[in-house]
Amino acid sequence: MIKYFDKLTDAVSAAFSARAVDTDKLLYCVKADMDSDGCYFDVYITYDSDRLYILSGYDRLVRNKKTFDSAFDFKDFAEYENADIERLFVDRYQYTCRLIAKMTDGRELPLGRFSSGFSEKFEQFCRRFDCLKRNETPDDSALDDRHIYCPKCQRKYPDPNRRFCPYCTKRSWIFKRLLGMFGNYKWQMAAILAMIFLSVALGLISPYFGTKLLYDDVLSESGSMYGQILPVVTAMAGFSLISTIFSIGYGIVISCIAPKVVHDLRTKIFEAMQNLSLSFFTNKQTGSLMSRVDRDSNDVYFFFTDIMPQCISNVIKILGLVVLMLMINPLIALCMFGIAFLVLAGEFVWMRGQRRHWRNRDIARRGVNAVLTDALNGHRVVKAFAREEQEIERFGTRNDALYTADYNRSRRSAWFFPVQQGVYAVFNGLIYCLGVFLVLNGQLQFGGLTLLISYFGVIWDPMFFFMYMGNDWTRCTDAAGRMFEILDNEPTVKEPEHPADIPDGGLKGNIEFKGVTFEYEAGRPVLKNMSFKAEAGKFTGIVGKTGAGKSTMINLISRMYDVTSGEILIDGIPIKQIPFSALRESIGVVSQETYLFMGTIADNIRYARPDADMEEVIQAAKNANAHDFIMQLPDGYDTITGSGGISLSGGEKQRISIARALIQKPNILILDEATAAMDTATERKIQNAIDNLKQGRTIIAIAHRLSTLRDADMLNVIENGELKESGTHDELIRQKGAYFELYRLQSLSLKSIGIGD
Amino acid sequence: MKQNTETIYEVDTLKLLEPDKLELIPEDSGLLTLRYEGEEWHRVTLTRLVPFISGTRYISASYKNDREEWKEIGVIKDIDALSEQQRKTAEEFLDFKYYIPIITRIKKITDNRMGYLFLEAETTAGDKRIAVNDWWHNFRMIQNKMISVTDADGNRYIIPEISKMDKASIKRLQLFI
């Protein structure tokens, strides 16, 4: 039964069955999306234990009352004996790929063409076919954790690590989920709604006293309250005051709840980010992630504290106004609604056009900012190459574009609003005439007319609010959607469900790679079927050219990523069964990329072991040869580093980073070009420090300068992701292989610049 | 000694291939065989060095060595300078390698799905509903006239010249470019 990679629809299954294919025996299936000419076409490629089948045609959906049924327009069918196929492989082009079958007679048969975005599943399909050829059972555990299809609409998720389907999920779903976060504040929410209702209702009644009651009953001799001004004025002021008090009340309650909800959301997101795998961070820009915690949470906060209460209040206001106005005089009320509709419709049309101008302005502004950032960040280069004039010109071009965008936008506004006001004034005048006519004919009292005019003035705000609220709603749901994306994202590297027992004292460091293959991108293996051992307590060096896969090996040992195939064992335990805490406590990494957090130098050194006392901090700094420069700083170990702190050189940062790894006292110490940014004398000192730490510790080191690895107990030479040679320095020199060549070239290059023997 | 030092610091220079000395022969593998000045390379690929500026100028010819590293043989300045047959071979290869669906008409753009933008488009490969995530990054204007679209699956589409599209399509696009 096919579980991966593309599902067979009922119609496709029927088409296969019609050609005597037992679909229950099919193992894996992929769907190519093009024909040989590059036109969209549906090609199902699948196999069972004996044969490979290719079915092509067009998938269709046929409406069946309220549901859709699948249909398939058959075009072609082909089948091949698995025995005749040597292997399957993906032939990549720039934007498309082909699945090729290398036949046992040497021919290469193209089986299907597809868009390059689908290459990963085809690579995996090929790998599984290879397993079948070798009579091996493929490891599908990595696929089991992935969520490929939306259970509701059956379409593929764009991101298998995020169970979110943009095809069938409505925007309101995010809003409902966001509202759900207010679930702990039900009573407060009920109080808010009640206060908003009372505030608006009282606010609407208030004008009645100042207009209709005042003119028709108090000031008119025939009025029921003739001359009683004080109670009317008191009632008017009282209603306004109580309305304002309720308004303040709900504002206070909201301002207490909304920040708490946003605070909780921000905390959850940050916690979720900390649990995500490294691959998530390498695929996202740091700035974009930072904005999710910062700007997006502010957008959500603004919506709930500002927009939501206004929305509720304006709904009540509009409904109240419509009822009250119709009650006073339906004819004038309907005329007023007609004018309101015309004005709003005009503004709506104008606004749609204006969106384009705003977007143009936004793009132009980003263009100006990009040149500004470029020129300011690269000012050294600008000055060094005397390109000031060109930069001014480049900025001028972008600035001109911004001016044009601004001018077009403003010009459109400049004529629209006066015209709108003019049209409004004309229609308003006509309504007044109608009102006066009705008053003169005794069909409407003067106070009623003034109350209607007063209400007509009030109705605009809520109407314009709803017209422009769409942007705020979109901004809020987009922001919340982006935040939920992080919350919903599942780490690609997961904590073991059934962790192995790790003995006291942690892992010793017997590391074994068993046929490890790793790909950051499908079909482009960085490590290829690599097997090697690093013994506990020994110093293992990894040597190779840039891009050979050395740092990837380190990432795999510290389980930043999981292997694509094969296995890594530490002390005989599969790495996937070792709890993260035990793994991280046992492994200390000093990498090329050093990062110092905001805080003192002492805090940075004791980052991995906050309980380390000051003596241990100083000892680690001394071991890392950092003590001498730290004591020269005015604030010594209390010197603030990181954002806003003192700026240290690359070598100084690196030494603090080494001290940070040393204080952890890990059983396995990994040095990834740890001394690359240092001069030879400093490097030698640190090397001595590392030598001191070797006792009882497993050290794995990567270095370009082979001299630093000369004393390694074992050297592994990596080339294009493959292990080429292993042995001690002397053994490898005697072998005269890849290591010898690298060593010879380095010696020669050092000699040519006057260094070395 | 001197020779060794030179090997280490050998400077890579641009080698322009002379059109009249060059011969391209299609292979069954889909790649090419290149003959030039008495030498012959197999499994050769051609690469457009300036694909957005010109599809026929500055075409690099390279092959994979034993260490699976791509090595450049040289650069053809303009394939239009090749003989008719050779030009046809190079063009066919490049057209296949750089095949990309061209968006000819935008029927509808829906922008309301939590960071996803849906384009209902007519392309040279047929009708397609394209889901674009994070359109700001995956909807890129190139050289002020061309748009490159990358969908949620990582597939690419292109609009080579926006001004040549119909007015309705341009209007729909304008909010996103």
Image (spheres, coloured by chain):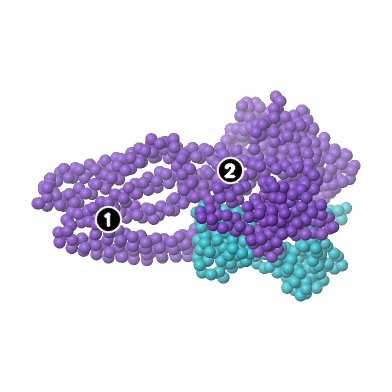
Chain colours: A purple, B cyan
Q: Give the image location of residue A174, x and y in percent.
A: 49, 46
Q: Residues within 10 Å of mark 1 (few under 14, many from 20)?
A: some
In this rendering, would A662 be left or right of A744?
Answer: left
Q: Give the image location of residue A638, x and y in percent.
A: 58, 32
The residue at 75%/41% (across/down) is A566
Based on the displayed image, in which of its 4 quarters is residue A188 positioned?
top left
- Label 2 SS: loop
Q: Earlier in the sequence, mark 2 or mark 1?
A: 1
Tell me whether circle 2 and circle 1 mark residues in contact (CB < 8 Å). no
Front-most of A386 and A741? Answer: A741
Residue placed furthest toward the bottom:
B84
Q: Is residue B56 above or below residue A692?
A: below
Residue placed furthest toward the right:
A734
Q: Give the image location of residue A62, x and y in percent.
A: 56, 58
Residue identifier under label 2: A489
The residue at 66%/58% (across/down) is A42
- Label 1 SS: helix
Residue placed furthest toward the left:
A221
Q: Is residue A718 visible?
A: no
Residue placed furthest toward the top:
A504
Q: Give the image location of residue A532, x and y in percent.
A: 80, 39
Q: Residues within 10 Å of mark 2 (few under 14, many from 20)?
A: many
C-alpha separation, residue under disc 2 versus residue under disc 1: 50 Å
In this rendering, would A407 be left or right of A40?
Answer: left
- Tell me the chain of label 1: A
- Tell me the chain of label 2: A
Front-most of A193 and A680? Answer: A193
Q: Is residue A212 visible?
A: yes
Residue identifier under label 1: A456
Based on the displayed image, in which of its 4 quarters is residue A197 positioned?
top left
Amino acid type assigned to the residue bearing label 2 in the image: Asn
